[in-house]
Image (cartoon, coloured by chain):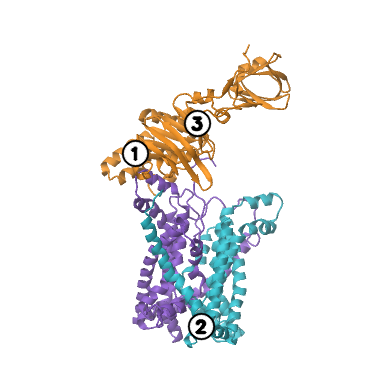
Amino acid sequence: MSAASGSRSRWGLRALGLGYLALLLLAPLVTIFYKTFEHGLAPPLEAITSSDGLHALKLSLLMVAIAVPLNTIFGIGCALLLVRHRRRGSALIDAVINLPFAISPVVIGLSLFLLYGTKGWFGPGLDEAGIKVLFSVPGMVLASIFVSLPFVVRETVPVLQEIGTEQEQAASTLGANAWQTFWRITLPAIRWGVAYGVVLTTARVLGEFGAVSIVSGQISGETETLPLFVEKQFQNFNQAGAFGASVVLALLALTTLLAMNVLKRKEDA
Amino acid sequence: MEAGVATRGAAPRVGLRLPGVGLGLGRGTVVLYLSVIVLLPLAALSGQAFEDGLATFWHQVTSPQALRSLELTIVASLIVVAINAVFGTIIAWLLVRDEFPGKSAVNAVIDLPFALPTIVASLTLITLYGNDSPFDIHLAATQAAVVVALLFVTLPFVVRAVQPLLIEMDREMEEAAASLGASGFTVFRRIIFPNLLPGLAAGVALAFARALGEYGSVLLFAGGLPHTMVSSVFIRQQIESGNEVGAAAVSVVLLAASLLMLAAISLIQRWGSRHERSGGSDLTVMPMSGEDFAAEGGDDERR
Amino acid sequence: MGITVEGACKSFGDFRALDDVSIEVPNGSLTALLGPSGSGKSTLLRAIAGLETLDAGRVMIEDEDVSKKPTQKREVGFVFQHYAAFKHMTVFENVGFGLKIRKWDKAKITTRVHELLRLVQLDGLADRYPSQLSGGQRQRMALARALAVEPQVLLLDEPFGALDAKVRKDLRAWLRNLHDEMHVTTIFVTHDQEEAMDVAGQLVVMNEGRVEQAGSASDLYDHPANEFVMSFVGEVNRLGDHFVRPHDMAVSLDYDEGTEQAMVQRIVALGFEVRVEFVLADGTDVWAQLTRAELQKLELRQGQIVYLRPGQARSFSGEEPPDGDGASTSRGSSSGGDDAEVSAAA
C-alpha cells in the first residue's frame, strides 16, 4: 500500500491496538511495582528475606540450574538429529517435543504424580529403594524439565537449517573430525539461537507454577519455589509477601525480555 | 508459517558424522530422554484414567461439575482466541507497518506473558480488577475474570505468529494490486489477509491449546467457585480430594484436545506452505518471537 | 501526448534519487531507462506509476497531471523484476484480478483472461499456481495481468533481471513483438545496455539521479554527450583525454605518422569477433575489436609489436555538459561532445 493510508484509520488502528496493550499488559506490569512498594520498602523486603522466602528463591534457582543445562544439551543434540539426520521417525520426535507447548501444566503435574506416586507405576519400586521423587526436589526437577523441554530445540532448528551444511563440509575437507567441526564450526554458528532458547527455557522454569505445585506438595521451606511462595502468601493474606516475591519474579521476567530482545537482534544479524 | 528451506540442511550424503549424534547412540539417547520425561508420565496418566474401566472414566468425565468446567473452559477459550485473533493481528500490523515512538519497547513487552509467571499475572489482575480495584472494575470470581486472564496469556501467540508473515510479505504484491486498481481495503482483503491466514490459524490453534490448559493466571483471579472453575482448576481440586481417577479422566480429555490442536497446527503449516516452491520441511515452526525464512524461486532464475 | 515528467526531485533521507529530472516519452513508443544501480531509473519509473511520491516536479500522462493521483487511479500497468505474483491465486485469478475488482462479469473475465493467456503463450496453464511456473512463465503471466485492464501506459522494472541469459534474450524479442502488436506506450528500466539498445526505440540514460542523454540507440552510440554516456553505451578505450571505440582502432604492422606503438598481450576469440588486448609504450591497456578475417590477415601473435591508429577519438574535457545540470529533453539528436578526428585515415 503506497502513499496515503488514510491518516484517520491509522490513528484509529493505533488507538485500538496500543490501547488494548496498555490495558492488558502495561497496567498489570505497573501494578506489580506500585503495589509492592505502596507501603514502603520494608514489608516486601522483610517477606522476601524471610527464611521461607529465601528458601523459595534458592529452590527456584536450583530448578533453573538443573533443568536448563539438561534441556540445552538435549536441545542441541536433538536439533542436530532432526536437521542433519532426518529419518522416518523424525516427525514423531518433532511432534513429541511440541507436546509441552500444548498440555496444561496441571495435566503434566498429575501425570508425574501418577507415575511416581505411591499408587503409581514406579511408586512402589521407588519406595522400596528409598528414593523420594514426589514432594521433593527430584519430582520438581522432572516437572521443570518437562514444561521447558521444547525451547532450545525449537530455536536451534531453524538456525541449523539456515546455515546449511556447506561450512561443515568445508571443515571436513580440511581435516576436522566430527567433534572439532561441531565445536568450532556448528556451535558458533548456532550460538545466538541456542542462547535465545536458553533464555526462554530459564524464564519458563522460573515461572512454572501448576505442574510443580502438584508434584511438590508446596511444603513451605522445603518444596516451595518462588511462584508457589507467592500463592501461599496470598492465601495467607500476606499481600506484602506475595507482592515482594512477585516483584522479584517480575524483575527476572523483565530481564528475560531484555535478553530476548538483545539476542533476537544478534540472531537476525 | 513457512518452515525452513528444504534443500539446505538435509542429511549429508556420506561421511559427515556429528558427535554423539552418530545414528545409533544419538537417536537412542534422544528417544530415551523424551520417553522418561514426557511419554512415560503421559502413559501413566492415560493408564490410570482408565484403570477402573471405561464406564468409570465416562462417569467421571460427565459429572456435572466436570462438564460445567469443561464447558466454561471451551467457551472462554473460543471467545478469547477470537478476540486475540483480531487484536493480535492489529498489533502485529502496527509493529511491522507503522512507526511510532517507543515501538521497540512495545515489541519487547508483547512477550511479557511468555516471561511472567502465571501466578504473578493472576495476582496483578486480581489487584487491578478485583475487590480493591482502583478502576472500580470488579471482575474477581466471575466468568469474565477467566476471559481476561486468558486474554493476557494468549496474546503473544497470535502476534508472534502473524508478525513474521507480515515482515516477509512481498510488498510488491501489494503494489501490483494497487497498480491494478485495488483500494487499500481490497488489497488487505484479497492479498494480505490470505497470505497471513496460515500464520494466524496456527497462532490461534496454539493460543487455544494454551487457553484450554491455563492454570496459574486463572487460579487467583477467577477462583474456584463452581461457575468460575475451569477444567485445570477442577482437576487440581479432584487431586486434593483424592479423586485421582476423576482428575486423570478429565486430564485425558484435555490431553486429547491438546493433541488435536497440535495436529491441526501441523496440518495448517502444510497447507500454508503449499504455494511455496520448496514445499517447506516437515519440522513445525512454533510462533516464538519471530523467525523468517528464505523464499522460493523459479527454476530458470539466476542464482 | 504520451508521458511527460517535469523537474522531478526525490530524496530518500540524504540520498538524492532524482535530481531535477525531465523526460518526454512519445505516445505509443517503447522507451528504455538505462543506467547503473542507484541512477534513479527505478525511482523515476515508480514515480510515474505513483508508487513513489515526488518531493518536487510533476508527472503527466496523456496531457493530464497525475502527480496527485494515487496509483490505483493512474491506469498504469506495472511489471516487477520479481514478478510480484499473487502466489495464493491461480494464473487465471492473477490475470483476472484487475478485472474482478472492476466488477466485470464472469463470462467477460473468462474470455479476456484466455485471450491474454493465448497472447503470452500461457494458455493451458490457467489453473496452475505461480509456484508451479518457471521464472519466464511467471513474468509472462505478470505481463498478461498488467495488460488485462488495458492500461494507458505499461511500465516494466528490470523485467528480465531475475532470469537466465537465454530466457532473457527470448523474452526481449517477445516483448518487442508484443509492443509492435499492441502499441501501448511502454517504458522499461534496465541496467543492461545491450538489452536497451536491442529492444527500445528510444533510450534515456541516467546517472546519479540525472538524465545524461536521451535519444535513439544510434544517437547515443555515435554522438554521446559525455564521457559517462560514451562508456556506458558501448565499450571504450581511454587514451589520455580521448575515448576510442574498440572497433575504431585500426591495427597495422607498419609504423606511420599518427600511430602509436603497442604490444599484443592477448588474443581472445569471441564467436564472430575477436578481441585483441594491447599494452602501449606508456603502460596503458587498450583493446581492439577485429573480425576474424582481419585477424587472419594480420597474423597477430602474442608479444608482437604493432601500430594502432584510433579512427575516431572523442574528447569531453574542458567542456560544460551542453544543457546545464543533467536535464535534457529527448526527441531527436543530442548535442555531443567534441568529435576530434585525430587524423584522416589513409
Q: Amino acid at mark 3?
A: Glu
Q: Give whichever of A8, B280 is nearer the camera.
A: A8
Along the line of sight, the residue nearer the viewer: A124 or C341: C341
Q: What is the spatial separation of the Cα atoms under label 2 and label 3, in whole angstroms? A: 74 Å
Horizontal relation, residue A52 to residue B159: left or right: right
Q: Which tint was used for chain C?
A: orange
Residue at figure coordinates x 59%, y 69% from the top left: A71
Q: Circle 3 — which element?
A: helix
Chain ID for label 2?
Answer: A
Residue corresponding to mark 1: C148
Mark 1: which secondary structure?
Answer: helix
Chain letter for the purple colouring in the rendering: B
**Residue C285 or residue C134, whichever sits in front:** C285
Q: Secondary structure at mark 2?
A: helix
Residue A220, quarter of picture: bottom right
**Chain to which the residue tagged by mark 1 belongs:** C
Let me know if marks 3 and 1 both belong to one chain: yes
- Crowding near the residue tagged with mark 1, few <14, some 14–19, many ≥20 C-alpha atoms within 10 Å: many
- Residue C299's spot in the image, x, y percent? 68, 17
- In the orientation shown, which residue stands out farthest toward the bottom? A236
- Mark 3–mark 1 Cα distance, whole angstroms, equals 25 Å
The chain carrying label 3 is: C
On the question of residue A215 being in view, the answer is no
- Quadrant including the C terminus of chain B: top right
Residue at which label 3 appears: C195
Judging by the rendered image, the residue that carries numbered circle 2 is: A242
